[in-house]
Amino acid sequence: MNILVLNCGSSTVKFQIISTDLEKIANNNDRRLVRGVIEHIGGEAICTMEAENKPKSRTTAQLRDLRSTVDFILRWACASGEGPEDIRSISDIHAVGHRVVHGGERFTQSVMINDDVLKSLDDCIDLAPLHNPANIKGIIASRDLLGKAIPQVSVFDTAFHQTLPEHAFLYALPYQLYRRHKVRRYGFHGTSHRYVAYRYRTIRDIPRDQVTIITIHLGNGCSATAIKGGNSIDTSMGMTPLEGLVMGTRSGDIDPSILDFLATKEGLTSHELESLLNKQSGLLGISGLTNDMRELLEEAHENKDRRAILAITIFCYRVRKYIGAYLAATGGTDAIIFTGGIGENAPEIRSQICEGLNWMGLEIDQSRNMELTGGSEGSFSKPGSRLTAYVIPTDEELLIARDTARCVLKGDPKA
Ligand code: ADP
């Protein structure tokens, strides 16, 4: 079946069409028919799209909202000459899989969307006011444009982390705040952590319940997850994606009292403080230059820029601290997996993170580490290293398509 995978943000939509079914999943031969991204929705949008075996196209279009964007994607995909060979009309799209950021405590796995599910997604808006509204609009737009008969599935960033035990998900705040407002750690990037854990067990040919690893997703957003017996038992992002590792523009962990201190000293409102922590901090805030790791590495090498070097050092040090914490949380782990734009493409960052971890049995093969970039997958620890290290490129869209196929074809997203 052909599955449209939608990742709808407020001004950006990433999409793919993936051909998959239970047999293709079993044989790992799903086909990617289309991939694309539409940016600057709300005005003159920039549309970059590529169908299988066809050249990439880049155009602009006036797209005022998500509905017109989904409509644009469907028309493009069905247009002869531009879209993929397999899609001739919208009847060739058999289901839609949506990335939904927050599923609260209700959703522990992917689900078929019905009115009841949509209502629950609405209830989660308080928890993810920046993300869930766009995800919901994407669902409604697809239902309007493709018809109610086309099944739609919601795949949550939070679902994989619903196995966190109470001692890992509760903050040490008055307990009634959890009861009243569900203030707790939810964790995010769950689809990515789950996908690389699945790839790891496939590469190693081990059963799910024997997967005890630390997965580290380093992209614009960054998070680490401790996985024991196949389940997420702790993760660095919290009630929102702000907690934990240093990110492109997000601070990660800070002392919460800093907020009140800055409100007084700098006269900042809560809205301004939130923007400071989410948009002006992290790599950008420390370096004063950029949130882009590639550019920071260039600055560090070419100009020996002190603050670029400092930003990279703090970034790597924070990841290393979490590795230490999650080694303790898992009671010893078999592998550390790197993924995301930085994790997959920056050997220097991987090497700096792993520096000095020999004491816990991690021995890095530097030449192998340098080879693993640009989407390649494999181990970069020395043979015989007690703790192994891997690069595994993430593929959230593939996981969303497969969950959608499994929900539609067998009523259950589980592999
Ligand atoms: P998102 O979280 O938005 O999906 P990505 O996973 O694409 O982001 O990661 C983006 C980050 O990856 C940026 O900081 C970018 O500079 C970094 N990155 C991509 N390629 C490289 C590279 N070759 N070397 C270093 N960093 C890279």
Image (tube, rainbow, N blue to C red):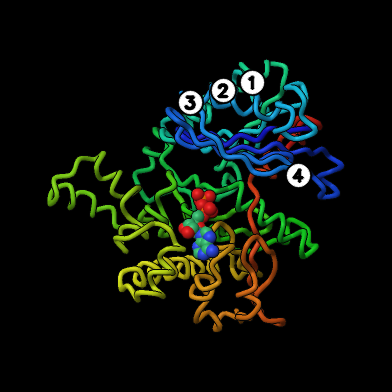
* Mark 1 element type: loop
Q: Determine whether label 3 and label 4 are within 8 Å by CB.
A: no
Distance, label 2 to label 1, CA atoms, is 6 Å
Q: Where 6 sits versus 91, above or below?
A: below
Residue 389 x/y as whole percent:
63, 71
- The residue at which mark 4 appears reads as 53
Amino acid of disc 1? Asn
- The residue at which mark 2 appears reads as 118
Near-viewer residue (111 or 142): 142
Q: Where 390 sits versus 48, above or below?
A: below
Q: Residue at x 32, y 64 (%)?
A: 287
Q: Residue at x 84, y 43 (%)?
A: 24
* Mark 2 element type: helix
255 left or right of 32 in image: left
Q: Determine whether label 2 and label 1 are within 8 Å by CB.
A: yes
Q: Residue at x 34, y 57 (%)?
A: 284
27 left or right of 284 in image: right
Amino acid of disc 3? Gln
* Mark 3 element type: strand
- The residue at which mark 3 appears reads as 62
Near-viewer residue (190 or 376): 376
Q: Where 390 sits versus 138, above or below?
A: below
Q: Earlier in the sequence, mark 2 or mark 3?
A: 3
Q: Quadrant of residue 289?
A: bottom left
Amino acid of disc 4? Asn
